[in-house]
Image (cartoon, rainbow, N blue to C red):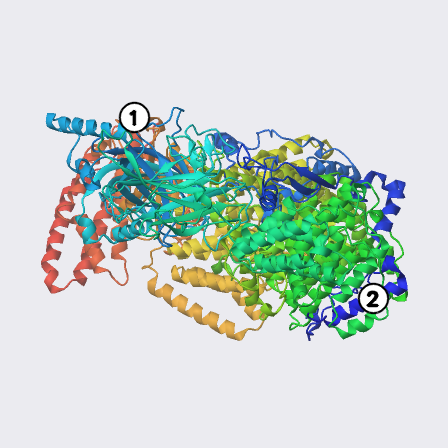
Amino acid sequence: MASFTYGEKQQYRQLLNSEGDAGEGRMLTPQYKRTPLTYVQHTSFSSARNMPFCLEPVEPLDIEVHIQNQLADPESEPFQYLVDYPKDDIEVTLSSREYQTVTPAEPDNWNNLTPQVRACVETYTKGWLMVTRSYRKCNTESRRKGLNLPQQIFECDESFNLEMQGLRSSAGQQAAEPQTEVAEVFIQDLLQPTTPEEVDLRNKEKRKSGRLTDMCSLYPPLDEEDAGYSRVIPQPPCGQWEQKLQFNFLELKFEIEIEPLFVTLALYDLKERRKISENFYLDLNSKEFRKIVQTHDDAPCYFKKAIFSITHPSSEIYLVVKVEKVLQQGSIAECAEPYMTIKDSETAKSKEKIAKLRFQAMSFCRRLKSFRMPFAWAAVDLTSPASTSGSHNSLDRDANTGGSGTEMRSHSLDSKYNGHLFRPAQYNLQMFNKQEEDKLSDEDLMKLIADEKKTSTLLRRQRRIPGVFRFEVSHVTEASTFCFNPEFLEVRPNNSENTDLTLEVLEFPVSGFSVPHTTYRNLLYIYPQFLNLSNRHGSARNITVKIQFLEGEGPDSALPVIFGKSGFAEYVNEFYTPVAYHSKSPFFYEEVKMKLPSNLNEKHHLLFTYYHVNCQPKQSQEAPEVPVGYSWFSMLDNGHLRSGSFELPVCLEKLPHLYSVTSTTQAGMKLLDTRKAVFKLELRPVSTIYPQDRNLERFFSLCESAGEHHTVVQQTEALRQAVSALKVVPMEELICFLYVVLDKLLTLLTLSSTKTTEGALVSKEIFEMLIAIVDQLHSSEEMTKDSMGRNQSLATYVHHLFSMPAPSEAEVTESEKYATIRPGSATAALQMMRKLSTSDSEVQAAKASVAGGSGLKPSKLFHEELAYHIVFTNGKMRNQVYRHLWFFCELLVKSMSQYVSDTVGWNSPRSLRYPEHFPGIIYTLVNIATEFVKHQLSDRDGNRPHLHDQRIDFLRIVCSHEHFVILNLPLTPSVQTLGGDNQTQDAGADESTVGIFKLSRKFRQQHFLIGLLLEEIANVLTTESESRLIRREAVSLLHCLLASHDGDQRFHNRGAKVKVAALYHPLLDIILNSLPVLADHDNSRRKLTKPYSNPGDASSLVITSPVVTASMNRHSAPIAGPPASIMPAELTQTVLFCFLWVLKNADEAALREWIVDLPAQQLLGLLDLLDLCVSTFEYEVRGPWMPPDKPGQPSTEQISSVVYRKSRDMKLRLEKTIFGTTGARREMMKRREYPGIEKLFTGVNAGLHEKLRWRKDLTQWRQPVGRDKMKLELEEEALINGNLTVETNLIVLDTLELLIQLSSPMPELRPVVTGVLKVLIHSLSCNQSTLYLKDGFNTQRAFITKFPEVLFEGEPEHCTDLCLLLLQRSTSHFESTRTQASASLYLLMRQSYHTHFPKAKMYITLTLASLSEKLSNQDKECLQQTLTMILSYLEADKAMEGTSFPVQVEEFLRNLNGVLCDTVKLQESPQDVDMQIDLMYRVAKGLQSYVDLRLLWLRKLLVKHVQRGNNAEAAHCLVHSAALLAEYLNRVDGSVHLPMGSVSFQKISLNVLEESLVSEDIFSMEREGVWAGNMFSEEGLLKLLDEAARFFNKAEFYEVVYEIHKLIIPIAEFHRNIKKLSVIHGNLKATFDLILSEDNKRMFGTYFRVGFYGSLFGELDDQEYVYKEPAITKLVEISSRLEEFYKAMFGQDRVEIIKDSAPVKKENLEPDKAYIQVTYVEPYFEEYELKNRVSNYERSSNLRRFIYSTPYTLDGRAHGELSQQYKRKTILTTSHAFPYIKTRINVIEKQERSLRPIEAVIEDMQKKTQELAKATSENPPNLKLLQMVLQGSVGPTVNQGPLEVAQVFLSEIPDDPKLHRHHNKLRICFKIFLKRCEDALIKNKGLISSERVEYQNELERNYEALKYHLQPFLNRRIPNLYITPSQ
């Protein structure tokens, strides 16, 4: 016997010493102080940060005392269910046993049963005694079932598009006049005067309305089924309906049908070379054939369906099909020949043969119907289909039932869990093998199958029998009607779909794989194998064996216990084996199934009669069979059921009297071959009442012997032998009879309790045997374990079958059946235990001081005896006991429960239910177990992570108790703690309400268990060294515990929930302090986007103000020190959920006091935590918008993305599976994470450390889900996630409201108030439902009303963020959201009117300008509706009617609408560059009062022009920027050396004066630092001017460069920047040189007038613009460009170019087309202007007026005769002068002048004359230009033009006096023209070379000819030219 360890010795001494000191009543109460589990030796850590969060241990309060006090307190009366355990907590019930069959399987005759058989049958048939915990499921129920959640509508959820459809239909109408639309929704109470308190109360009522009480139903633990630690209810011991295969046999057909055929089927495992099922007999014959072979008058039963079980499958499972026929004359080959050669055809010859064969077969059937012969066989591989089509066993699957061969292979039965993957399939067997007479055994059969797989040459040469055998295989999980088990008992049906008879086929047990017997079964299978009658004289060739089971030797002794085949009687009394034709030594393959009687005796035996069957009738014999020999076989051998293989002799004569009890060696008995065994057979019993092991039988016999004497003293030796016999029983056999063995052992354990040494030793041996059995069962790899690592069979036994053994009836009366132990018996038990440790010297010394007792009666209560044995077991057995302590504790609990239920009852006080000393025993047991675990931990490397893991597992078990809340004393008042000086009550915080939010000493004393959990949570959250697994397990435990409270119906009352939540108040402080380790999902817990961001190339222009560049950092970091390891995001989410759970359910008054007492830094941390909660639980977008015809249905993209969105959950589930609470896989992972883990817990965790292997039965596998199911899951997930987001954000909002109400505008609390605003804005900017947005905006408006100074006097980012939020929500597609946003916007403007209205308008404009760039046209329409709603509030606001507020708001909204429309249009026309420039210009114009935004948009214009190569326009953008900046600097600074605003730039461009229209609000902005930065300074101005000069140089506007430098020089001179001045003057010199050299060579641009006509153009319709194009751009170029662009936009057939420049008549245009008219125009100057515009530059800059001419005639034609050709001159005036910041400017004025024909030709002649003068005056001369002009004037081909003009208009003096002046003017023009031609000829003559003289002469001749012909017209004068009409 092993010695006690040191700890056991100490404890044992205390137990012994306590007997004399404290008396017997307190003998087993431990006298040492309990040490907590945290006090285990471990390695120290150097860093203080790595030290665990370890508080001083405390002793819990006496729970019973406090429960009694609370019950007496009248204030606790409403919460009595939180004080004491309910009276109906535990119920002990004896229920009827559940059977799988309708009729229980029990013996036919209960009389004469042996004690052993009776004990087994009683175990299998007795009722179930169960201890039911009524409240066990209160905290483990599924929390998502039956949820009735409201549908939350989210803007981001693309499935909700119903409102969008209506919005689209009315989009055009809404966009037209947004100012006149009346909002449909109006917040009536927005403008009503109310106090802040009334507003808060109203908002609170709205928030609390309709809230979900069960919060954890939205966020359940990872796996609800395994949430926390739940007591797993074991499966009942009634043979569960497992996963099985159902075979439906459809057809058996051969080529010819001439006789009945019979099929035998069985499953074979070719890999293991064994038969795995019994035979199933199938009869598919027609009614005609069945009637011929029927042998009885009763209605036969034909089974067409069979159910096979394959518990241990392999890769080679075959269904073997054997076909038999009625015996007939001829060999198998002869009988099979017709089936292989004759076809069932319509030919007469074929019909004749078939009819003859049918006649012969029928004659044999009538005579030999009882005898059969083998015919054919086939094998079907169930694990994979055959690959060769048309082979004898090919499996051609129907197309409609299966799939490809690959799919079929995936259905192979590789494990017990693959059955549910086996899909329905149909098999078609097309060929059969002919049966060989000498190969009938199973060994031969499996060899043939193996050879067939190899497709050997021999088999290919064999002829096969064609035929069809069709059957279906499907998976069944429950029994149906008309289903019978292997004993022909009807199975209890679960559905009524089946209409055919179905038979379950028995699966034979596999060696090494055993399960406990649970039902009565007593079957025997007989396998005749071989008979050799070759030495017998006489005719004995067609041999059959008749098998009978006899209970005597009389003629009627044969019992009907043989199972009949399909079509025969249910039970028969004889069975004939098939006949091998003409074989004297036949082999047999038949299986005979018998139902053995339950009361077997020595008379029962088997009788084998051997017959020769005459195939042909003989006149001397009526019966065809002739007996040729006999054999018999006794069933029992000394009471043991015989089994195995046997060889029997054959008696040739009639059996003598008493042959069954006579030896075969009896003299006078004639035996074949001199008593040589010639008949071989095998017996295979399948019995649950007759063990196959003789030692087990001996054990049962000895147990019955001990029980008969009612005392163990006299049977000590017999019991020792029984235990010894049990030790050598094979494990496989022991498992089979496990439940019977346990019943016997536990009964003997009680009977063996005695004061004697011998009885104590026997009791010890019995208990050690029990320990050994339990240990072996847990160590077995093949035994099933539940999710907690417990052996499933043991758990089933304890829960259903175990009943407290009754005490000895001989010594106690019935009334004393459950009497408790008298006090004296404890001493006797102690003395008994002393004898168990005689080898320990220290214990012997301790025993000397204790007085002995005598004369005690033995113990009678099982739980007391068992507790003693557990406590005092030592040595190796102690390790095994505590390794599997769960089993013994379950026995204890059930025995104790049964005892209380049967005796004192549950209404009795707990202190009186058991003897006084018994709680001490239990306490000792618990402490020894605790010390054992601590001892194992303290001796192993100090591995702290694993210690933490075990602590968490322990807490998980404790917290899973259904009365966990009661155990924590939720109603315990603040009481003085017990103890001495070192246990004084906490001071300070503990005395105040805020103390309940601290994990103080008092809290941990009053709420001990929850204190342990919170201490562990604080440890894992604040200790950096904790592993990921430990932290996850601890948080998961907390989450499961909260979920159990939510799912518990007892706590649904609000008052109860508050009491429960009070237990978790310290969790708020713990999580608040662990903020640094919480993960931030997107590294930015703010969802607000920046108001705007500058483009990369504009960084030199705009320096963003603090509004834009303000830090987006978090509020604070209240926890000092470096952060611990950041926990994963999903774990952070769970921690935050627990935090929100406490906030939701905590008492509001307590929260108020806690918040008030928090310092400002902690309040900032709380806001940080709330901000993180908002980000963590933000709703995820579900997918793209659905088509209009399928609103609300998930799209393909959504379904495809489900897997991705669930990846995080699947990762957690996988980790839960890997790191589960039990299983070998977890141990393996722990070994990897914690090196040396195998050295720890050698006796813990169900022995999983011994043999680690992957157990498939511990893994939760899921079936693949279909598309429809995926859609439903997607919709359900969206519903739950939406409600989770709403609830969590409402909790945050509730807390923010508390902070708002408790805050004040004091300077020290300003950061807190600011933080509240930030969190509020963040929550409103996230993806939220419309329900939450209503409450959120209510709170936002209340906050602005209370703290307006935070918004307008604090950091600018606050107001910017709020404005951006409101404008973003104003674009919502939901009207309710837009209503809330519009109300907040209006209230914001109204609140800021008196003091901060300009600033509010500025921030709104800033954010709108930033936001509008990202808006679609649809968003713009929604925003316009919001502006309309604001106008509605303005009209309804009577309090502001007498102020300027309405006017300012209307003007402001009008400006906003313009900016909005232009910005949105900018996004819609990315290809129309001209339109983009126009829109940018309009946006910049609308933002003129906001310097930085206008500069930004001017910079965008600059970029656009640079991209197009418009240097002049780019330069003017910079000039306007500089002028705006100069205007700002002049008003702010006013320095004399700076430009005097935009007026200083007017010489550069007249347009720049518009930059002087800067709002006066700019001064207030400047004082607040809004326009701060380097750009708003002299350096910024100089940078802009330098850049402008550079672009003007590129554009060849050199004169402007000088003007710019004139602005720079005073600044450089003021700062005495000589270097700068030197550079400037150098640049000026270079510029002037360029002017001198390139003045006449510069070309500044070409201008065209473009008109747009048609509704397709939108706002461009009927608009005219002047386009500035690059120099030398032809009309056809711009026309082609515009035509191609708009054709690409509108369509090829919808755009036309108007070729002429005549006025367009719109009524003549097609309405569905777009028309463009392009006309070349020239700058137009008045005469006075030409005097000032001398240079080419002056006539190319500051251009506002342009002219073009249009020819026409009075009859409507464009061209006619010269005398009828009129001309229309059109003068266009643009809104701005060219060049400008855009390349096209709209025409604002048009003037038309019509010229008569003579006036038109005068203008042409003057123009030609000017060309000649210009060419002549060129210096230096331009010879090429001069000759070109001369050739065009006097050339022979063109001089007819001037001559024709003269002939038409000067040949006659006009009759109209009004034309006389024009006539004279034309004559003078010709004179001047001739003079200019003459000058040009002279000039040309002096310039040409000698080679060009002839050309000069030709020109002179042409000139003289022209002059000659014009002379008559020039000399004619009009006499009365100067006479007035009056004269």
Secondary structure found at label 1? helix
Percent of width and height locating residue 1605: 49, 64
Q: Are marks 2 and 1 in contact (CB under 8 Å)?
A: no
**Total of numbered circles in the picture?**
2
* Image vertical order of residue 1312 relative to residue 487, above or below: below
Task: Give the quadrant of the N terminus.
Answer: bottom right
* Image vertical order of residue 1533 relative to residue 1284, above or below: below
| Residue, disc 2 | 16
Q: Give the side of residue 1627 with respect to residue 887, left or right.
A: left
Q: Give the side of residue 938 with respect to residue 991, left or right.
A: left
Query: The disc labelled 2 sits on which kind of residue?
Result: Leu
The quarter holding residue 20 reads bottom right
Query: Dot 2: within a 10 Å radius of its alpha carbon, few (fewer than 14), some, or many (20 or more) residues?
Result: many
Percent of width and height locating residue 834: 78, 66
Percent of width and height locating residue 1341: 70, 41
Query: Dot 1: within a 10 Å radius of its alpha carbon, few (fewer than 14), some, or many (20 or more) residues?
Result: some
Query: The disc labelled 1 sits on which kind of residue?
Result: Ile
Secondary structure found at label 2? helix
Q: Residue at x 26, y 31 (%)?
A: 621
As drawn, which residue projects farthest toward the front?
668
Picture disc at residue 1738 = none
| Residue, disc 1 | 292
Q: Give the side of residue 1873 with respect to residue 308, left or right.
A: left
Task: Give the quadrant of the C terminus.
Answer: top left
Camera-side residue of 379 and 1578 = 379
Percent of width and height locating residue 957: 68, 54
Camera-side residue of 1336 and 761 = 761
Alpha-carbon span between mark 2 and mark 1: 87 Å
| First-in-chain label (2 vs 1) | 2
